[in-house]
Image (spheres, helix red, strand yellow):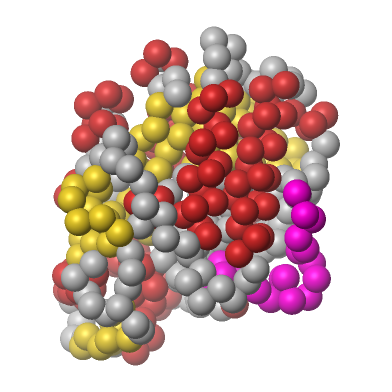
Amino acid sequence: MDIMVVGGAGYVGCHLIPALLEKGYKVKCLDALFFGEEPIKSFKDQIELIQEDIRTFSPSHLKDIDIVINLAAIAQPDQQELIDPQLYYEINHKGCARVARLSKEQGVKKYFATSTCSVYGYQEDLISEKSIPNALEAYGKSKLLMEKEMLPLADENFIVTILRPGTMYGFSPKMRFDLVVNGMTWALQEFKKINVMRPGTQWRPNVHVLDVIRLFLALIETNVDKIQKEIFNVGANDQNYQIKPLAELIGNSVGNEYELGWYGEPDTRSYNVDFSKLKNQLGFTMKHTVPEAAKNIYNALNEGITKKNEQTNVVGWFKQVSDRGAIKLLGI
């Protein structure tokens, strides 16, 4: 089976592609490589790498592909608008919609798209897939527009499934310290202090990146009747955390003395997500936990296996790339 991973050199993709290779799948990776090749260097010679932008790549690359897994995105909110919001709409919405349309035209059989729980924005009640989204910024809004173009493409020859993961966490060869668990763990190791974004009572759902990988592997083999035109929140109900208790969980899991601090204006996003559908419809549950990940990341930092740098912050790096002219608005 031939699988194309779009955005395969990122935080999720550099875990997913080796897992697919281990299962015996033939893999193509389509990625503009705005963050470079380093995360995929260990398996680069085992895949076909296509360094192209999703907004302009040739449809011919999709020939003979059975499954497309689209991870491509500017995958972080930018409330300060450090980068042009239109870039979100061109990449997360228009670019990803183009990938889906071309996939269908080229005869791809299954299409898995990653959205985000950020489409829920701010809501006080427990949120399910049936809840009305309330995206607050370009990241969530662009993802929601992408979703709305995906599902109508589905038919008996083109299976479409949309995943809305919670905030991911866990070690990755393409490390990110702009994700809440990862960032808090870095601060703990660096300063013995975790700064909490005010007010600290806001809710976030969390999911380990390796559990997301496990889900993709499961979806490939799942009966199409269970996944066709479906949206799944991805996470576990017991991994919905308010930010201050989450910081305390991370600090206590490492076992060293630490203190809590505060930063920022009050967070406008808060959502407590119900993940029952994933468990009830697919029988899929999470294996990994925040304390486990915090210990792993803390140790990796101590041992010099990973470190914080400019590329571990998505928005900051995209701003630099944009300022250099390496990525531009195309007006699509």
Report whether 202 appears left or right of 175.
left
Residue 154 magenta-drawn?
no
- Residue 290 located left or right of residue 44: left
- Residue 203: x and y in percent read 23, 62
Residue 277 can be seen, yes or no: yes
- Residue 94 picture quarter: top right
From what the image shows, is residue 110 above or below residue 204?
above
**Residue 287 shows in this picture:** no
Note whether 182 is above or below 45 in the view shown.
Answer: below
| Picture quadrant of residue 39 | bottom right
Number of marks in the image? 0
Camera-nearest residue between 123 and 180: 123
Instruction: Locate residue 270, reporting x and y percent.
Output: 28, 62
- The correct choice, above or below, for 290 with respect to 62 in the image is below
Residue at the far top: name it: 156
Q: Which of 3 and 202 is in front in this view?
A: 202
Residues in magenta, as a range? 311-332
Please tell me which residue is depicted at 68% across the width and 29% down the height of the picture.
101
Residue at 40% of width from left, 13% of height from top?
Answer: 225
Counting from the top left corner in percent of width and height, residue 165 is at 39, 46
Residue 294 at x, y percent in the picture: 30, 66
* Residue 185 falls left or right of residue 202: right
Q: Tell me the quarter of the image containing the N terminus.
A: top right
Residue at the location (27% across, 24% down)? 281
Q: Which residue is drawn at 69% across and 17% down?
A: 107
Front-most of residues 150 and 69: 150
Q: Relative to residue 215, is residue 246 drawn left or right?
A: left
